[in-house]
Amino acid sequence: MLKRITLLLALSGCCILHAQQSCDQAVPIGEGQYNATFTTGSEVPVNCLEDGSPTMGIWYSYTGTEDHNVIISTNIAGQPNHDTRVMVYSGECGSLNCIASDDDNGGSLTSLVVFSAVAEETYYIAFDNRWEENDFIFTVTETVFQLPMFATQNISLDGDYKICVTDLNGDYLDDIVAPSNGTVHVLYQNQDGSGFTSAALTAPNTQFMPGWSMAAGDFDKNGYNDLLYGNTYGATIMLANEDGTAFSDIIESPSNFSLFSQRTNFVDINNDGNLDAFVCHDIAPNVYFLNDGEGGYEFIQGGLGDYSEGGNYGSIWVDYDNDGDQDLFIAKCRGGGDLAAMNELHRNDGNMTFTTVASATTNESNMADMVQTWSSAWGDYDNDGYMDAFVGASSFASGHHKLMHNNGDGTFTDVTAGTGFETFNGMTHDHFAHDFNNDGFIDVFGGSNTIMLNNGDMTFSPMIVPGGSGPIGDLNNDGFLDIYNGNKILFNNGNDNNWMKITLEGNESNRNGIGARVEIHATGGTWTQQIRDVRSGDSFEYMSSLNVHFGLGQTETVDQLVIKWPSGLIDVINNPTINQTTHVTEGETLGTLQTQKISLTLYPNPAKSYIKADMQNNEIVSATIYSLNGKVVSTIQVTDNTIPVENLAQGTYGIILKDNTGKYFTTKIIKE
């Protein structure tokens, strides 16, 4: 854990501050409802959130007689909503520590924050006028004390856009990245676990800073991550130099092209091994920079979300049909019943061909919906091997949150009723799918500073955290996911659950392995398989870690780790070590093929026309055949445990077989 950084609150000038106007004169409060009024000349609270320029503050203190979880809310039934911002501190005036804060997670721009209060300890609650100066009402609610999942730590980082967690120096540890024009500010995570080292990397100036979103990935395949900025007037790709010590060049959208960027993603759209840059367009069809892999690109509009008036907010690339390529879901938003708000799903059929299966004109997938949403959170919530979707509402004017179960046949079913989401009224622009408590089931982080914890049976229970949304990563390398939020980190306190972290290095595929499907398989326990897709850019605006994280619960042995690369190569690692990071380079397991100790017989081998597989009670459902230098030769759907080989040239091949339980087996075959 990093050494706590203390915020020094210095009162400038010699003004005499009255009650509520300063930390020293904070008004004691307990459970109840209170009126709040700003006064000129009051002490401005030190900001625990993103930068701003407030000029006034309102101060209160809370001292409980028992241990409680305390909820502060400015969303009061029957009262007008106001755009408030709240900070909670421990410590003493003049030496305060941020422990919780919030801006808009109470819904309709109101604030909601929770903190764990120990009996007889004083906490300070302060509001500022960052957004408005109107009088407002807030409530204090005491609930049952629970040990918090996260501990807040203040940090100091320059930069205007604090929305990115990614590795910037090539060591695969998650760093914190905050650009300003001409500079990219970084907190590098130290390899010895001692905290962070700050740096300011020079960067070209650009007119398109990331006011709406940011993504990261190695666009030019030089070994260091580049940055993609989404701006109201265009988009910029900021390219890292050859040793990752600066940003040396930029690619910008054409100056004569009006691009109202929303969500941005790095993704290999044409699967040529080079990352492309995709940008949602708010008011027109979407655009992308198609990378030619030789330092050039083509700027293209159309083909991936073509509704003429746009409405494109939250793109996410996900392999929903398990065919090995990345499909595109677009969370859309537009008021007044405009069809630009209809969510879209585009199925990737390969070779740059996409079929629209949800839109204003078709809905064969059952994913077209008019709910106003800025983002969706995709994950396999029931661990059945298919990606499900949580579509998070940013307004309830046209519908509520929806949990859509993937049926495995290209369609989805609304299963919201009974999951806990049907009564969850927290709203936000950003929704995330991650396993925060490492129990082996993916949770949803959404509105009202709330993580909906997956109970393992497709029901979810709310847990309020001491801060709003932000990019997610393992910021102290302990195997538990943390949240970066403005000027603080919410460090996960962890538990006794096991975990795995996988870092990828592509060669035939893009270097980050973006678009890879990563699977783990185990026997017994509360789960037998889990899947993840490697993505650049989830939620609406944030860039979270590119590393793959699995919580294992109490499972102590993982049978297989499987990486299905975008190139078609498959790496299989049997009995991987848990509670540590496993680094996998594309194709590294192909040269060390060994038949697992199972009841598998292949015959005839050598073979001329076909090979039969005998696995006792299991069936082979697919086979991937590749040359010994790692090139995929053929991918076959297998029936009757028979693998045709008549079209293969003579020689020795590697083969990866998948059985009907989802496990993989590797060996060699010889074609006569």
Image: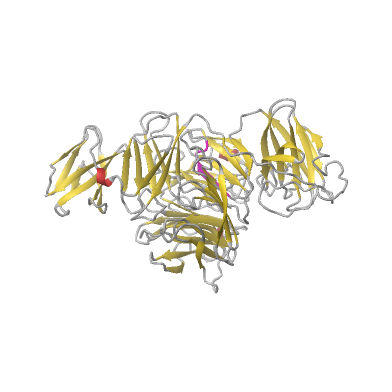
Q: Is residue 395 left or right of residue 472?
A: right
Query: Vertically, is 532 above or below 168?
Result: above
Residue at left 60%, top 50%? 394
Res 658 quadrant in image: top left
Q: Where residue 146 appears, x then y in whole percent?
A: 62, 29
* Residues in magenta, as a range: 430-436
Residue 97 left/right relative to 194: right
- For this view, does 349 lie left or right of residue 255? left
In the image, what residue occupies the spot 75% across and 38% down? 124
Q: Is residue 325 visible?
A: yes
Q: Quadrant of residue 352?
A: bottom left
| Residue 435 among magenta residues | yes
Quarter of the image for residue 523 reads top left
Look at 17% across and 53% down and name the residue there.
Answer: 648
In the image, residue 556 sits, relative to residue 247, either above or below, namely: above
Where is residue 440 drawn, in percent x and y?
46, 35
